[in-house]
Image (cartoon, helix red, strand yellow):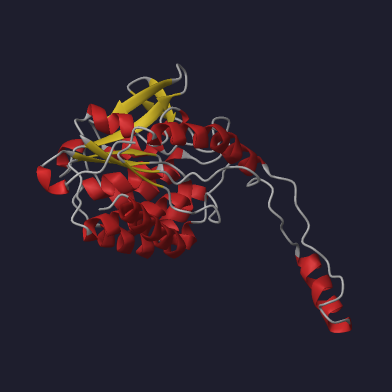
Amino acid sequence: MAGTMDFSDGAKIGYALGGGGARGLSHIGVIKVLEEHGIYPDVIAGTSIGALVGALYASGLRAGDIERALRLDLRRLALLADVRLSFSGLVQGKRVASALKSFLGDLTFSDLKIPFACVATDIVHGQQVVIRTGPVITAVRASISVPGIFTPVNVRGRYLVDGGLVNMVPVSTCREMGAEYVVGVNVIPDPAGRIHEPESSPEDDDDEQETSARQPRSKKSKQPKSSAPNVVKVLIQSLYIPGYRIAMENLEDADLAICPEVGDIGFFQFDKEVEAIEAGEKAARLALEEAGL
């Protein structure tokens, strides 16, 4: 990473906001703290959930506005997890587009107050696609399309999916947009062991209560059983394993790297927005302190 800088020197600042499902709500906390320090972006690049938050910020909203908007409409965010079987993906495009429209309306890139780039992947050719023109909804919809879960988006004849396959934290895109100082935010935790966490069934809970009634808790009690990972967990983990490595490589070129501790928040747990935002705030304060800013 590059060294520290004086933000009063007029250098062009970029925000590179990474993907990671509901964990990406921590971007809001990061941005909130940066605002408190008088740090604002001249350009923004986002991947997946980072594209959604980045687009909202580029539209002129502040962190508090985004927090209130998303908190008031968590039901819409939950639609992103509405699984319906199809041949190209588990979540249908119309429902995703409906959810995104509630946040982004009919914005086009030319309407945005801050230059913004949305990163997606051409799933046919395996190439990065940076979208900077047209409807913002279409671009974000493409960027969040986790392969196998969300259906791909046809944009000008190219089938686009989640940008995290090629550029999880788009620091390089910010550089291409002219940023001289880039704040990179990664919300993908180390994937080790995260696919198969213990889960207890209702039967286990009943047995535990009966055991507690019969004997002191100091005696041997049942441990939660580990359930086999379902297809969604397998798909998400399959992306997180290379995604974490890509994110770490992306952050090497960031001037300020921020990594909120959001490993306890599931990919679709949008109801944990409070925990995510607080994690973002904590990580941003720590990163700024360590950077002497």
Choose between 26 and 292: the one closer to the eye.
292
Residue 182 higher or lower than 260, as above or below: above
Observer-nearest of 257 and 273: 257
In the drawing, does residue 287 fall left or right of residue 261? left
Q: Residue furthest right?
A: 214
Q: Position of residue 236 (x, y in %)?
A: 57, 40
Q: Position of residue 33 (x, y in %)?
A: 29, 59
In the picture, the quarter occupied by the N terminus is top left
In depth, the one of 170 and 200 nearer the eye is 170
Foreground of the two, 86 or 213: 213
Return the x and y of residue 267 as percentages of the image width and height.
Answer: 52, 49
Q: Position of residue 164 (x, y in %)?
A: 44, 34
Lateral position of residue 207 relative to residue 58, left or right:
right
Tell me: 148 left or right of 203. Answer: left
- The residue positioned 16% from the left and 47% from the top of the image is 7
Residue found 44% across the figure and 39% down from its top: 93
What residue is at 75 percent from the left and 46 percent from the top? Answer: 228
Give the answer, above or below, for where 80 lies relative to 206. above
Q: Say if 206 sits above or below 120 in the image.
A: below
Residue at 22% in and 43% down: 107
Query: Across the whole image, how many numbered discs are drawn on residues?
Result: 0
